[in-house]
């Protein structure tokens, strides 16, 4: 039997890993109360939530990838297709559940010596986390926490969910970048457009190319507003100096208003792009801090006029007039 949860109780001098079967979950939780005199910290890592409860139960509760099926553990990933062909769906299902189950242990093991901080963000939903609504770690009052062996008890009361995105293979830890788009609204702009977006981040230390802001399908963008997206990558390139932004309009036949030919404008108008990286504050186990960069268009206007299937470049030199807008 493979169990969908890995629960970890952290003691002052050692760590004990406790695997709890979801059928007896309530009884097991009651058997290990959080106010036990010999317990400093109880951490719950939620993996593969299709098999049990999802409510926060510990001093701090982590939900990697929304606590659902983990990257690299779906039926399309090797060796699952081969297992499915050779041994049937029952054995493939066992391998699938085991892959998700063991992932929590692998994340904690990797966190011991990882130079990449497992920064998790307190949020009321994974969707809001991906939209950058819970990204701030400034003046941290439990808004962020380091997941893994270096976890410390947050200041806030138990009952919160901490979300984090990880990769499908080692190293699982990913650097997290929040990309915020400030959209302009010139007279010729449509009130909204929809489409796909990618960014490439440049710094003095390197470049991260083609980060997908819309991996789950097109996004509706309303001119005159701001939108944020959280993307991840294994590399830390330092402070971003330049962003290359790609836009592609999408026409959906099921939405007649999105069909755009000669009588509408499929351009996206962007005033500025902000990039924030979540990082550690330099002390092992401390909560995250932020590194912010604002970038503006190189053109003569205070915004970039981006036609469909084209790119625009933004640099970290915004003049005073642009900064006021």
Image (tube, helix red, strand yellow):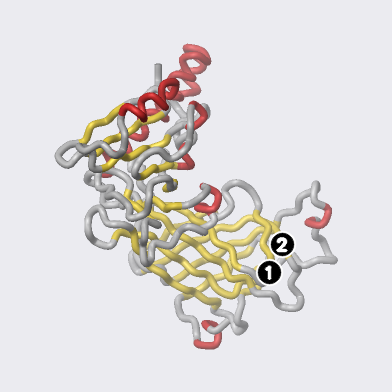
Q: Quadrant location of the N terminus?
A: top left
SS class, disc 1: loop
Q: Position of residue 263 (x, y in %)?
A: 85, 66
Mark 2 crowdedness (10 Å alpha carbons): few <14, some 14-19, many ≥20: many
Q: Report the residue that reaches farthest toward the top.
A: 87
Tell me the tag on residue 159. Answer: none
Q: Position of residue 261 (x, y in %)?
A: 82, 61
Above or below: residue 99 compared with residue 70: above
Q: Which residue in the structure is indicated by mark 1?
A: 223
Q: Is residue 41 left or right of residue 24?
A: left
Task: Tell me: 10 left or right of 94.
Answer: left
Task: Name which quarter of the figure residue 293 lies in.
Answer: bottom left
- Image quarter where the C terminus lies is bottom right
Q: How many marks?
A: 2
The local secondary structure at tag 2 comes to: strand
- The residue singled out by tag 2 in the image is 193
Nearer to us in this view, 315 or 71: 71
């Amino acid at each position: 039997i493979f169990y969908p949860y890995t629960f970890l109780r952290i003691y002052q001098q050692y760590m004990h890993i406790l695997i709890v079967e979801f059928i007896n979950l309530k009884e097991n939780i009651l058997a290990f109360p959080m106010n036990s005199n010999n317990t400093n910290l109880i951490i719950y890592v939620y993996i593969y939530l299709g098999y049990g409860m999802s409510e926060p139960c510990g001093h701090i509760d982590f939900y990697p990838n929304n606590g659902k099926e983990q990257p690299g553990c779906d039926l399309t990933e090797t060796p699952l297709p081969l297992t499915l062909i050779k041994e049937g769906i029952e054995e493939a299902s066992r391998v699938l559940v085991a892959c998700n189950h063991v992932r929590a242990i692998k994340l904690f093991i990797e966190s011991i010596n990882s130079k990449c901080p497992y920064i998790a963000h307190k949020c009321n939903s994974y969707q809001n986390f991906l939209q950058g609504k819970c990204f701030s770690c400034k003046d941290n009052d439990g808004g962020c926490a380091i997941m893994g062996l270096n976890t410390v008890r947050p200041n806030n009361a138990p009952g919160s969910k901490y979300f984090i995105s990880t990769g499908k293979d080692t190293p699982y830890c990913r650097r997290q970048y929040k990309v915020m788009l400030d959209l302009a609204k010139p007279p010729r702009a449509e009130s909204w457009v929809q489409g796909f977006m990618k960014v490439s981040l440049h710094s003095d230390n390197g470049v991260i190319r083609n980060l997908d802001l819309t991996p789950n399908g097109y996004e509706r963008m309303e001119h005159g507003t701001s939108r944020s997206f959280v993307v991840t990558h294994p590399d830390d390139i330092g402070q971003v100096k330049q962003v290359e932004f790609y836009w592609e309009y999408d026409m959906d036949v099921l939405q007649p208003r999105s069909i755009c030919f000669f009588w509408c404008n499929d351009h996206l108008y962007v005033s500025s792009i902000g990039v924030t990286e979540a990082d550690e504050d330099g002390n092992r186990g401390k909560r995250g801090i932020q590194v912010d960069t604002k970038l503006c268009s190189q053109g003569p206007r205070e915004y970039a006029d981006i036609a469909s299937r084209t790119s625009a470049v933004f640099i970290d030199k915004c003049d005073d007039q642009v900064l006021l807008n």
